[in-house]
Amino acid sequence: MNYNLPSPEEMIKQLGDLINKRNEKERLGDFFNNDYFSEFRKCINNEVSEIKNMEVKRSIKGAYLSACIKRYKRNIVKDYILKIALIEGLDLTQRIADLFFIECLGRSVGEFFLNEHFSGLQYKENKLTKIKRTSENIVLNPVKKEEVKGIIAKYKNQIIDSVEKIKCYFYEAKLY
């Protein structure tokens, strides 16, 4: 009988492929699905209706609505940053997070927000862990900056599409 057995190299390669499939990193699409956005939609509808029912001047309502949409856009990008950091094994600093916000929203979100959400995060054992740092690198070296920009470029369209989706939910809720 003639058996077509793979060579030892092919067997090792097949075994490696199986292990890689099993250990495949979680994808963004698994996290940012319709259920995730439906939760945002519910929150947006509730908050917009509360603002509309407030008994204040129309200009003040407009300011509240403007602040509301900025907060939702900022929070969706924050969720993406944290998830991307897990997928890519990225140690987040405030400057790296700020680079994400600047690239995706076109502006920084402010030192207070960055400090509150991105201070001292390090990727360890497939999760982001808060660590105490005596000092955090304020300036990114050019190599790290290019690496981060490559990661941002990889996910930027998906992040921007999600921000646009949230804006559409918001403006839809605002009209009704």
Image (cartoon, helix red, strand yellow):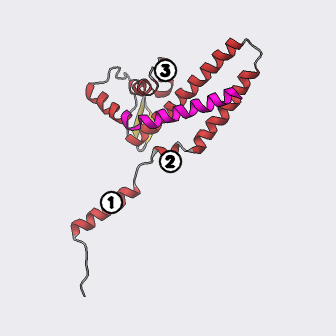
Q: Are marks 2 and 3 in contact (CB under 8 Å)?
A: no
Helix, strand or loop at label 2? It is helix
- Residue 128 in view, yes or no: no
How many marks do you count on the picture?
A: 3
- What's under tag 1, amino acid-wise? Asp
Residue farthest to the bottom?
1
Q: Quadrant of the N terminus?
A: bottom left
Distance between the alpha carbons at the discs numbered 1 and 2: 21 Å
Tell me how far mark 2 sits from mark 3, CA to CA.
Answer: 27 Å
Across and down, in percent, residue 98 comes to 42, 24
Q: Under tag 1, what secondary structure?
A: helix
**How far is disc 3 from disc 1 in space, using C-alphas?**
42 Å
Reading the chain from its start, which is encountered first: label 1 or label 2? Answer: 1
Residue 175 is a magenta residue? yes
Local crowd size for mark 3, using a 10 Å CA cut-off: few (<14), some (14–19), many (≥20):
some
Along the line of sight, the residue nearer the viewer: 116 or 2: 2
The disc, 3 or 1, on the residue closer to the chain's N-terminal end is 1
Vertical arrangement, residue 147 with respect to residue 62, above or below: below
Mark with earlier residue (2, 3): 2
Q: Which mark is residue 109?
A: 3
User: x, y (%) of residue 94?
Assistant: 42, 24
Q: Identity of the amino acid at label 2?
A: Asp
Residue occupied by mark 1: 17
Residue 90 is covered by the magenta coloring? no
Residue at 67% over, 30% down: 173
Mark 2 Cα-neighbour bin, 10 Å: few <14, some 14–19, many ≥20: few
- Residue drawn 72% across the image and 29% down it: 176
Give the residue at x 24% y 66%: 10
Q: Position of residue 83 (x, y in %)?
A: 46, 39
Q: Name the residue located 47 percent from the left edge and 18 percent from the top edge.
A: 111
Query: Which portion, as a residue range, is magenta?
Result: 152-176
**Which residue is disc 2 drawn over?**
30
